[in-house]
Image: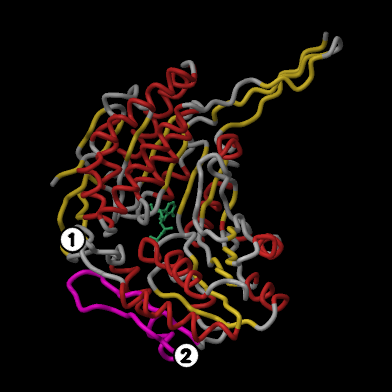
Amino acid sequence: MEFEMLIDGRMVAGADRLEVINPATGAVFAQCARADAAQLDAAVAAASRAQRGWAALDPVQRGNCLRRLADALEQAGPGLARLLTCEQGKPLATATREVAGAVHALRFYAGLDLPLQTLHDTPERLVLEQRVPLGVVAAITPWNFPLLITVSKIAAALCVGNTVVAKPAPTTPLTVARFAALAAPILPAGVLNVIVDANDLGARLTGHPDVAKISFTGSTATGARVMGTAAEAIKRITLELGGNDAAVILDDMDVRLAARKVFDAAMVNAGQVCLAAKRIYAPAGMIDALCAELAALAEQTVVGNGLEQGVMMGPLQNAAQFERVLDLFEDSRRCGTVLSGGPVGGPGYFMRPAIVRDLPDDARLVREEQFGPIVPVLAYDDVAGLVERVNATPYGLGGSVWCADPARGIALARQIDSGTVWVNTHLGMPLDVPFGGAKQSGLGRENGIEGLKDLTQGKIIAVAR
Ligand code: ADP
């Protein structure tokens, strides 16, 4: 299978090629076009040329383009879901939901706009606020939800009149390349460009003088580099970075129900979610029963090739991440008690869900973001000490509280230093609710009107009467 890039309205071969591995087999299954610096520059130039014309369209016309794109994506859905499973590893049913999520995002943003606001209208003066698109937006995305995150960024940026150069992660470029092929006949040339690299063009893209805004989702370490590059030209940035979310169970919660919920919150997408539950805290008296339930759920999880029926958890997405999670697993065996899980013999990057107890707070699995199917279960005695431990992290992305009495949940949620804290759920993210991190988990917001505002800048027009 060969996959091309979208530059200036045309699908093009790359200056080079990239081999794409299926993580369930560990073998190369497709070739993707790979850009060189000249192709990246051509993509930015095309986006730059197209921007004024795109911004000048009526928002309804832009919305119609996004709707046509949603229809095309929906039609291609079944094939794309299979492709997503092959490149990312997730089970087909989950991949199908990801494609549906991308379709939903396109339709959601198709109906949005930031119209002119009147701030003052008096006999003395008229003050208007216009939201102006920023220009060319670079959308840089990771390998955990390659299609959903990239398409959501594209739809949001386009709906308010920006043009886009998108760069998916090098290990999962294929579904985005297919999306680009669907977009080519629908969008005016240059409005969307998709380039693929081998982790070598990120800095050139973020540092490009004609890129006005960087919308980045990825690790905190890479986010810091993006921020550094953006500083020179005072570029606008939105950073969605790592997390180390705590899921806190209160003592009025049913143990079985709690186990089911936090297990799913931790193991969703094989734990490869910035917002997955990465530390589970439970009252000391509940730990034994909770761990027994969690270990049973781990044993029941069917791990395998996501294309096979009945598989509940796919492989880790790439070899580097697999090695990193195995390293954390070995470290956890040394300083805690591993109740279940661990690596499955190859081929493929498979690991069974691991539940770890008896770890000290300074264990690597507690302090670091694991981004894999392994989770520590930690005991607490009183809520005051708990809050301190939950907040003792440079991250502040999400978190959840599980309880019978929602008022207790809200009271604790208010003390957790994160961008989002859920009560009796984890990971619900409607597109009209702003989302983003506190502390080193990010900067700026996506989704909601606040997210759209971050893709524009306010301009005041003040008239003396
Ligand atoms: P990981 O370490 O798990 O691969 P990253 O945060 O490094 O995650 O990657 C997220 C995205 O950022 C990918 O598309 C990657 O190619 C891109 N990227 C990597 N390095 C840079 C950089 N210096 N500037 C901009 N983007 C980069």
Tell me: residue 261, above or below residue 63: below
Asked if the stretch drawn in magenta spans residue 267, the answer is no
Mark closest to the chain's N terminus, 1 or 2: 1
Q: Is residue 66 above or below residue 85?
A: above
Label 2: how many residues lie within 10 Å, few (<14), some (14-19) or many (20+)?
some
Residue 185 versus residue 206 in the image, above or below: above
- Ligand 1 within 8 Å of disc 1? The answer is no
Nearer to the camera, 433 or 14? 433
299 relative position to 363: left or right: left
Q: Amino acid at mark 1?
A: Glu
Report which residue position mark 2 lands on: 335
The part of the image, by quadrant, that contains residue 183 is top left
Residue furthest out toward the right? 124
Image quarter where ligand 1 lies: bottom left
Q: Which residue is outermost to the bottom?
A: 334
- Is residue 259 shown to the viewer in this render? yes
Q: Position of residue 309 (x, y in %)?
A: 19, 60
Q: Tell me the quadrant of the picture where the C terminus can be found.
A: top right
Which picture quadrant has residue 402? bottom right
- Residue 55, image x, y percentages: 49, 21
Instruction: State the extent of the magenta-drawn residues as a range.
Output: 329-357
The picture places residue 46, in percent across and down from the top left corner, at: 37, 28
Residue type pointed to by label 2: Cys
Q: Is residue 412 above or below residue 140?
A: below
Which residue position is annotated with label 1? Answer: 308
Evaluate whether residue 210 shows in this view: no
Tell me whether the residue at label 1 lies in contact with that at label 2, contact meaning CB atoms closer than 8 angstroms.
Answer: no
User: Seen from this angle, which residue lies furthest left?
Assistant: 1
